[in-house]
């Protein structure tokens, strides 16, 4: 199946995809702040530059896009029909990096929470965000 856009249009579209301060990330940050949690963002000194860092609770939160991080079984993770091999390598590389950073953060004593983009869609967002404060305050080392 051929791409519906020419090379320049596709390049322009891809260049507009943000890696930081995404809409899902901003939703989580707004919720946390409104509920009294104070945090830092994109801390370069920690493995993987977590999206949200709550030093008081020694907790990091990654807000993952279902496509970019290969959310298995999610309807928002569909491998493109063009350049399939390239995309699979890209996404699998992201997954490997996620696993590496997860292990490094646990070694350093951080609790790791993942929030998937699909969990912030209408119909899921209330459940996802309402469960977040108890997860942050819990004593478990890792949560998904």
Image (cartoon, rainbow, N blue to C red):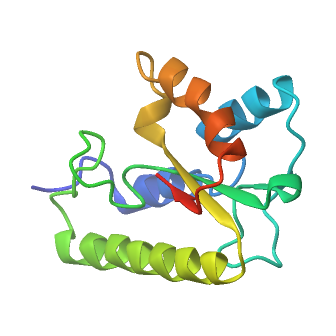
- Left or right: where 38 falls relative to 14: right
- Count of number-bearing discs: 0
The percent position of residue 129, horizontal first and vertical second, equals 59, 28
| Residue drawn 63% across the image and 57% down it | 19
- Left or right: where 107 falls relative to 46: left
**Residue furthest to the front:** 139
Viewer-proximal residue, 21 or 97? 97
Residue 95 vertical placement versus 55 (above, below): below
The percent position of residue 110, horizontal first and vertical second, equals 70, 69
The percent position of residue 102, horizontal first and vertical second, equals 55, 74
Viewer-proximal residue, 39 or 49? 39
| Residue drawn 62% across the image and 52% down it | 18
Viewer-proximal residue, 51 or 36? 36
Locate residue 25: give its quadrant.
Answer: top right
Residue 50 vertical placement versus 45 (above, below): above
Q: Can residue 23 be seen in this view?
A: no
User: Which quarter of the rendering shows the N terminus?
Assistant: bottom left
| Residue drawn 74% across the image and 27% down it | 31
Q: Can residue 102 be seen in this view?
A: yes
The percent position of residue 131, horizontal first and vertical second, equals 57, 30
Viewer-proximal residue, 130 or 83? 130
**Residue furthest to the left:** 1
| Residue drawn 73% across the image and 58% down it | 59
């Amino acid at each position: 199946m051929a791409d519906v856009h020419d090379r320049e249009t596709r390049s322009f579209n891809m260049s507009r995809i943000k890696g930081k301060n995404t809409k899902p990330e901003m939703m989580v940050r707004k919720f946390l702040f409104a509920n009294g949690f104070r945090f830092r963002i994109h801390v370069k000194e920690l493995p993987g530059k977590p999206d949200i860092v709550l030093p008081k609770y020694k907790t990091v939160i990654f807000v993952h896009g279902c496509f970019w991080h290969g959310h298995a079984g999610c309807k928002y993770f569909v491998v493109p029909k063009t350049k399939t091999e390239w995309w699979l390598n890209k996404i699998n590389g992201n997954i490997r990096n996620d696993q590496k950073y997860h292990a490094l953060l646990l070694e350093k004593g951080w609790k790791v929470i993942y929030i998937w983009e699909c969990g912030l869609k209408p119909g899921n967002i209330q459940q996802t965000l309402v469960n977040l404060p108890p997860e942050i305050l819990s004593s478990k080392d890792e949560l998904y």
